[in-house]
Amino acid sequence: MHKSLLTLIIISTLFASCKKEPDSFEIGKHHVGLLNDSTQVKDLKTIFGNDSIVNFIGDTEFTRHINDIEIYEKGGKKLLVLTPRQSSDSTSFIKNVRVLDPRYKTDKNISTLSTFKDISDNYKISQIDNLINMVLVTVKDLNATFTIDKKELPASIRFDTHLKIEAIHIPDNAKIKYFFLNWNKL
């Protein structure tokens, strides 16, 4: 009886110690590293305890509603830009995360070093938006929007902001500049 109880305790301990630690650079539909769609601004100091957190709070009429939070490694490399739902509210949830560092990757290995072909081969593209200097490629399955600089497009379509850009217009080797994860939590 004592041996079976001891064996059960040892097996339970082994299973508990084999629990997978969260990857601080993995991206999913509801998380970026240790951030998730329920993260509040007040939690950032705990999550990024080894990194630098810089709050930008605008004080002019033109910047008053900008409340981005930049996350830097201690060495100075910018990792992420976070936008909370409410300005100057520590209980506000994170509305979107701009991914800048290439170590952040999806389960299909998509990062800022990826190309349009990598995105289209691994995800269903939901929407493509034509802006002045960039093209936004939205993937609803990931809650992500990928930004491609228009310099990556053929010159014949680069300057027409009224053109409806389709996936066939974007070269396979067009590089991602950065991408956002959008969390619509109320």
Image: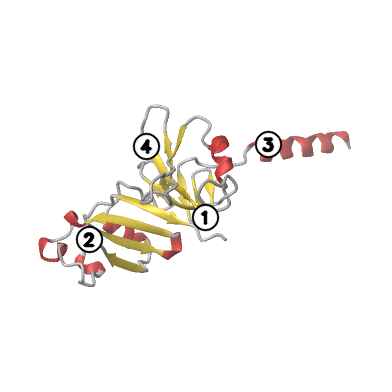
Mark identifier at residue 7: none
Q: Secondary structure at mark 4?
A: strand
Residue tagged by mark 3? 14
134 sits to left or right of 19: left
Category of crowding for the residue at label 3, using alpha-carbon neighbours closer than 10 angstroms: few (below 14), some (14–19), many (at least 20): few
Q: Earlier in the sequence, mark 2 or mark 1?
A: 1
Q: Amino acid at mark 3?
A: Leu
Nearer to us: label 1 or label 3: 1
Q: Amino acid at mark 1?
A: His
146 sits to left or right of 41: left
Q: Position of residue 94 (x, y in %)?
A: 51, 51
Q: Nearer the viewer, residue 2 or 159?
A: 159
Q: Earlier in the sequence, mark 4 or mark 1?
A: 1
Check if mark 4's residue and mark 1's residue have beta carbons within 8 Å: no
Q: Position of residue 15 (x, y in %)?
A: 67, 40
| Corner quadrant of residue 167 | bottom left
Estimate the spatial distance between the alpha carbons at disc 4 and disc 3, rounded to whole Å. 38 Å
Mark identifier at residue 30: 1
Q: Nearer the viewer, residue 70 or 88?
A: 88
Q: Residue at x 35, y 44 (%)?
A: 100
58 sits to left or right of 155: right
Estimate the spatial distance between the alpha carbons at disc 1 and disc 3, rounded to whole Å. 29 Å
Q: Residue at x 45, y 63 (%)?
A: 141
Estimate the spatial distance between the alpha carbons at disc 2 and disc 3, rounded to whole Å. 56 Å
Estimate the spatial distance between the alpha carbons at disc 2 and disc 1, rounded to whole Å. 29 Å
Q: Position of residue 107 (x, y in %)?
A: 44, 51
